[in-house]
Image (spheres, rainbow, N blue to C red):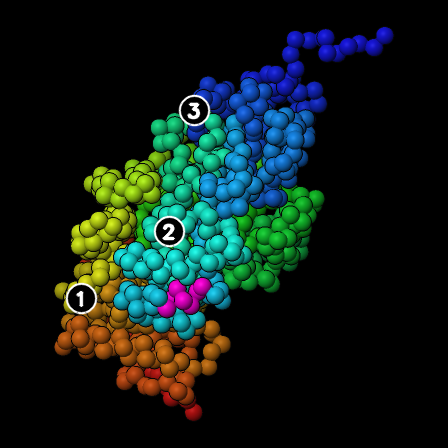
Amino acid sequence: MPLDWNRIGSSSPQLLVQPRDIFAALPNKPFSYLRQEQGEVLEGWFARKDDRDVVIKQNTGGGKTVVGLLIAQSTLNEGVGKAVYLAPDTYLAARVREEAVRLGLPTSERHDDPSFLAGRAILVTTFQKLINGQSVFGVAGGWRTPVDLGVVVVDDAHAALATTEGQFRLTIPIGHEAFYPLFDLFADDLKEQNRKATFDITEGDVTAAVRVPFWAWANKLDEVWKILYPFGAARDEEFKFAWPLIADCLQLCTVMVSRRGIEIQPPCPPIDKIPSFVGARRRVYLTATLSDDSVLVTNLKADPKNLEHVVTPGSAADLGDRLVLAPVQLNPNLSDDAVRTLAKQFSLGDRDGDGIPETRPVNVVVLVPSGAQAALWRGLADRIHYIKDLEAGVAELRAGHVGLVVLVNKYDGIDLPGPACEMLVIDGIPRPMSAADRREAAALIDSPTRRARDAQRIEQGMGRGVRDVGDHCAVLLLGAGLAMAVHDSAWLELFSPATRAQLVLSRDVALQLYGQGSGGIRSALSVCLDRDPQWVQRSRFALASVRYRNVGAVRPEAVAARDAFDLAVAGQTPQAADRLQTAINGITDPALRGWVREQKAGYLHFTDPALAQQQLGAAIRDNAMVLRPAVGVDVRPSRPAAVQARAAAEHLGATYGDSTALLLGVRAVLDEIVWDEERTEQAEAAWAKLGLHLGFGSTRPERLYGTGPDNLWTLTPARNAVIELKTGVELTCTGIAKKDADQLRGGVQWNTEANGGVAAVPVMVHPVDVYDARAIAVPEMRVITPAKLAEFKTAIVAFATALTQGQHLWREEQAVAQQLAFHRLTGDRIIGAYSVAVRRPK
């Protein structure tokens, strides 16, 4: 007779609660044992399972997907409620479901699947599916009944956080019916903030962006509602996903206007609008690279107390082997193009560069932030993949040798184990795309807060090629900015402990290669790729004693920002301002302090507009990139340094601690001054830094006062360089446009009014040195053309290099003076040496 299995055994996997027990009871699991690190993490979570918010940090490739699925199943078995596993995108959600099938855990793909609703299966979907204004899980005030959840597992939490900000941002594109009525409503207010940028928007400059002053937005809110409400009520295609989330706090929103459209975004996401997420009994965040846990508080309203401790394995040695080299750190004279060629040769198996393959070829994967950067690889790449064709591209890499493959703007969420990626090249890091993010990046450009975000992106990228402790990958970082990130101790502290240990070990290799060309780099890369026993031993030893940081990093001002927003939403704006003041009292970074003061002023306006303007005046003294007060900002006359060389030596000495840092820092500044319409803001900021490096008074009047030139260099007591940068102009243009010449003329006039008695030298950084036929001439105008800019950069690199040839020469006034003179960088010669006179068209 057949056995009645229902009467045999006292329990089943569906009734077990301990995640390790659940795994042990799975009948057809693909591997017999959990990794030690996975077991330790699951034990750590189980001990804290009743905490509402738990962060789990494991190295890339540490098996987080299995951990997340077992946590979800444990919650189902305990009867706490329904389980949702959120992946960053549909591609990764499909991979999670595949992993669940391998384990034998039931999953659902749809929110209305009876198995999910009955608590018998884990719903695996995307973060966007839950967090949007038409969420199938329900929106506060909407017609759907919110879905009650027991646990939400957020995979790749850093990617989810970026998604959150976008989901709570209403973007009205320039062609939309609401754009021009809204633009016209605030046109005068925008001009008062920044006249030039406002005109740039109307002229089609894709990089120009201006914030609507918070007082203008609040004072005209009735007119705003009349414009926007009809589109929100009609569920207009551009409105339907964001409007339901932000309409109730519209008065508190930050509003940015750019050529791409108008962005309306709250200071913090009103995550309460998604009751299923906010009300979930357990929220678990899986991350490999989230070094700053603050964004979990600001974006997802996580409990700061729960984040004080994070769950980690006992050891951080569960990371694949990586050698990380920044070629420009090893040899400042080695060009990026030479490194690109070297990477191509490795993909062909031609390691000595003689054109003849003599060893096995490897898959080389290149991460770039944009299409413009991808174009630099076009002649070398076997494939260039964008997000839309990423799944097929990754599958091809996993299937065998492809060659050199470029992935555009995808630094996380892809797995390239083993031979799929043995060499990884990071050629730049993603830049903020939204106008609000670009404004914040510009305001906090040198702030430790911004640096931490960039370090996170770098670490995300470096994790693509090592998905298992047995994996290996050689990593090349292109550009001086990335090289500085692995050289400067202030940067190194921002990486995870295991990655930092690998960077330190790689630096030991780099020290022996200093000054060598491509040959030395080839040899070092081969040591890693060929699994040299000495390298493998030292690599494993470097990680053996490394431990994770199990203490969360939550910035006080981030907690204050969340608290303040929630108070303001409840109508308690004075208390919101007071809450931010408690954070301001402890901030030592002036840029960040000014940024938070601007937020405080926005809340103060609702009850005391005059005090709000006073607070904004204090903010702009800390950070010139914040909103200008309604009464404007007094123009401070430019002051030249008493002695240019002394000013340069003082600045260089205070900025750079060693000769390598000096060379990398100078190169990083120069790398930002490029002909790229997407990076004009970075170019202007870098130009201002360059002036300080050379000992000039260097300011950005247009940013400081809303009028005037892009940059002003005080060359001598009697001469100022009035500089307009047009690095966003197409290199194929045929003449200097009338509007650009007019802007420079306006800058000259501004200098006359602001710095009476100081002559202006009008300078334009532009692709050509000839006027358009309609342009009105600017007397004595000079042009820094691409050829002259290249000469200028070469001279500055030579200047910096010369100062590294002795012990701290860059700190000595006499040595700096000698090199400034030799390279024609003194105030009386620099413009004549590195620019040409403008010409009239023939």
Q: Tell me the residue that label 1 is attached to.
A: 635
Q: The residue tagged with tag 2: helix, strand or loop? A: helix
Determine the main secondary structure of the stretch shown in magenta. helix
Q: Quadrant of residue 21?
A: top right
- Which mark, by number, is residue 837? none
Dot 2 amino acid type: Leu
Image quarter (top left, top right, bottom left or bottom right) of the C terminus: bottom left
For marks 2 and 1, give the one nearer the viewer: 2
Question: In 3D space, how far apart are the residues under numbered discs 1 and 3 (Cα atoms)?
Answer: 53 Å
Residue 546 position in % (x across, y down):
43, 28
Mark closer to the chain start, 2 or 3: 3
- Which mark, by number, is residue 51? 3
Residue 612 vs 94, above or below: the answer is below
Q: Tell me the residue that label 2 is attached to.
A: 250
Q: Residue at x 25, y 50 (%)?
A: 606
Q: The residue tagged with tag 1: helix, strand or loop? A: loop
For marks 2 and 3, give the one nearer the viewer: 2
Residue 314 vs 356, above or below: the answer is above
Residue 609 position in % (x across, y down):
20, 54
- The answer to whether 690 appears left or right of 205 in the picture is left
Dot 1 amino acid type: Val
Q: Nearer the viewer, residue 33 or 304?
A: 304
Residue 197 position in % (x across, y down):
34, 68
Q: Residue at x 55, y 62 (%)?
A: 375
Dot 3 amino acid type: Asp
Magenta stretch bounds: 178-184
Number of numbered discs present? 3
Residue 801 position in % (x across, y down):
33, 59
As for residue 182 lying within the magenta part, the answer is: yes
Residue 740 vs 537, above or below: the answer is below
For this orientation, the residue located farthest to the bottom is 842
